[in-house]
Image: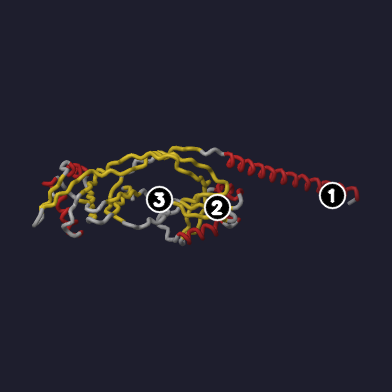
Amino acid sequence: MSETQDTALFKGSLLRSLQEEQVRLKMKLQRLQEQQQLKRELRNAPQDRVPFPMPEVPLVFRGQTQEGREVSKSLISNLRICYPLPGGSALVNFDDPMVANQVLRQKEHKIDLEECRLRVQVQPLELPVVTNIQVSSQMSSQRVLVSGFPAGLRLSEEELLDKLEIFFGKTKNGGGDVETRELLHGGVMLGFSEDDVVQNLCRIGQFTVTLGGQAVPLNVSPYVSGEIQKAEIRSQPIPQSVLVLNIPDVLDGPELHDILEIHFQKPTRGGGEVEALTVVPPGQRGLAVFTSQSV
């Protein structure tokens, strides 16, 4: 091969290398411009106030009470409303709402005992329910929300966060250095030091992570921080439940429970099948826990 041919081949190879490098630099510049645009959009994004209508959820009392106990965080958020019960009261939940309505027609009930007669008052039960929430929200450029955890996941909070940090801290999984992590109701928040990691994870969207010995499909979406600006609350009647008040301190708790249950099961008193009943003796306080019927 002549020197002239060698020179031509060298120039051709050099030209192709320069063209490939030019294409690579253009693509890198385009990615940088896209990231800068995303940063500007997130930084300049207005705080949207979005109304969230609350669904109509039938509530039912399951006979659970609690006092002075902190409710732990859970991976699945279930609707729970706690109603304070004063001392000298009882909460009766009937199987049939029509029975509760019949019991309420008589405002005062007289319960005959061997040596005395109890006079107690009954009234309908209404719970405060949020019907509409106005939230001021803003999307974060360095945080993501991981969701889709199954209800039966047997991991402590620390174990779950550690496993997620390890998985999403690996570049082969599209992640990066995890700076912050927090267990939320219904998901986990992960914070990263680099914006492009968040953008990449949200673009992928779905991951399969081994948790508790099982492969769990998880969703990754942008993390939106919000602050409640306004909440509308209305009272929702609980048709199966009756609140009993002004119970005197003449019997101990178990005996009083049995007396009330027998009384409110009598058809002659307008009663019927009692599904749940709890008594708070005088001098004490309690909380009745209401949950959605699907729980």
Residue bearing the label numbered 3: 77
Q: Looking at the image, is mark 3 or mark 1 nearer the viewer?
A: 3
Going by the numbered disc 1, the residue's amino acid type is Phe
Going by the numbered disc 3, the residue's amino acid type is Ser
Name the residue rendered at 24%, 56% in the picture.
Answer: 283
Going by the numbered disc 2, the residue's amino acid type is Gly
Comes first in the chain, label 3 or label 1:
1
Mark 3 residue element: loop
Disc 3 from disc 1: Cα separation: 67 Å
Residue bearing the label numbered 1: 10
Name the residue rendered at 46%, 38% in the picture.
Answer: 50
Name the residue rendered at 78%, 48% in the picture.
Answer: 17
Q: Residues within 10 Å of mark 2 (few under 14, many from 20)?
A: many
Name the residue rendered at 15%, 55% in the picture.
Answer: 259
Task: Give the answer, above or below, for where 97 lies relative to 279.
Answer: above
* Residue 284: quarter of image: bottom left
Disc 1 from disc 2: Cα separation: 49 Å
Mark 1 residue element: helix
Mark 2 residue element: strand
